[in-house]
Amino acid sequence: MIVMLHDILDIDEEEEVFIAEESLADLISLPVTVEILQSSPDLSDSIVIREDAGGDGAGGGDEGNLLGVAMKLSQPAEVWLLVTDRYGSSHPLAALPTPSASKVVRVEERLFFEGLVEWLSLALRDELFCDSCPIESPPLFVPEREGRLVEFLRPIMPAGGEVLEICAGSGMATQALKRLGFRPWTEDLDSCEICMGLKSGHLEANRSMALDALLLDRFFPPQKFDAVVGFMVGLIDEVNWPLWREILIRSSKLARDLVIYTTYTEREAGAVAGALSSEGWDCEVVANPDDLGIYDQWACVGRRHS
């Protein structure tokens, strides 16, 4: 795979790159990274990745936060193995003695994270960590839903800006955001759904995350996005409402100005509005019915108190 990480590491396209961990969640717990570092790896041929706040690209020097280290392995194959503890619960790289002759590259952290997301997405799409694909059929796609969402969202969404779509599944509703000119970040807990979206072209590799929504704040700061949206959240009932409430409240903290969550019923939209209102959002429950009566029939539209 030729990915952003090749540019970040400033290596040839033919060279193989692997991330030590298999998922974004593993980049928090670091099970493989810790094991590798405890084995005293050979760092005689390594690349140190440091944050470049100014975005000047590759360069020398030791300044800047340490983002990761790529070490050259020769067995069982010749590859660059990238380890990072930037998002981890612990920071074992701090004690890693890297040779002074190591190559140093600089990159903005947002690009580094996109590179990690892209590599993990392509590994998922190409079934690198799967024994076999349990789902062979293409994901469900309803063009009428996309068109209705475009019309519903057009007068509400801010012009331009960064958007996060939570619980995006395989990206059916994401197409409405794309038609409105956005390149949304998308998240879903179900890695098979994300995989189908990537294979179908509904999702972009460097902006698609197979991740629990409750872990998003480990990778993004508060109010990172102009808007956070979720389409057909639920179905919400008395049993799962506490979990949905936590997901929606925590995800909304990543929004600067606007949140939009569509639901199947008015009751669900009202519950979402009540939860967000208690957190300081100005919320409106909006009816959006159609003849099908299935998707996005109601919505909670929330704006931050001015």
Image (cartoon, rainbow, N blue to C red):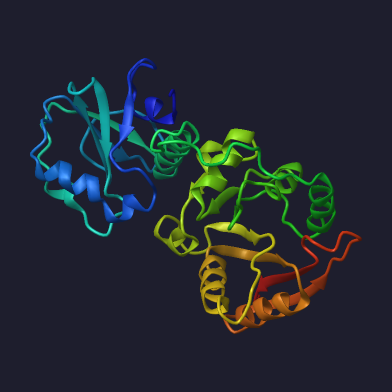
Looking at the rendering, which quadrant does residue 32 occupy? top left
Image height check: is 105 above or below 116?
Answer: above
Looking at the rendering, which quadrant does residue 267 occupy? bottom right
What number of labels is visible? 0
Image coords of residue 38 (percent x, y)? 10, 45
Image height check: is 297 above or below 27?
Answer: below
Q: Is residue 17 left or right of residue 221?
A: left
Q: Residue at x 50, y 61 (%)?
A: 213
Question: Closer to the camera, 306 or 146?
Answer: 146
Question: Closer to the camera, 101 or 203?
Answer: 203
Q: Is residue 54 visible?
A: no
Q: Residue at x 80, y 66 (%)?
A: 297
**Quadrant of the image containing the C terminus:** bottom right
Image height check: is 10 above or below 109?
Answer: above
Q: Is residue 209 visible?
A: yes
Q: Residue at x 16, y 41 (%)?
A: 36
**Quadrant of the image containing the N terminus:** top left
Image coords of residue 48 (percent x, y)? 23, 34
Question: Closer to the camera, 146 or 135?
Answer: 135
Image coords of residue 153 (percent x, y)? 78, 57
Image coords of residue 176 (percent x, y)? 75, 47
Residue lying farthest right? 291
Q: Is residue 42 left or right of residue 226?
A: left
Image height check: is 98 above or below 240?
Answer: above
Question: Closer to the camera, 84 or 136?
Answer: 136
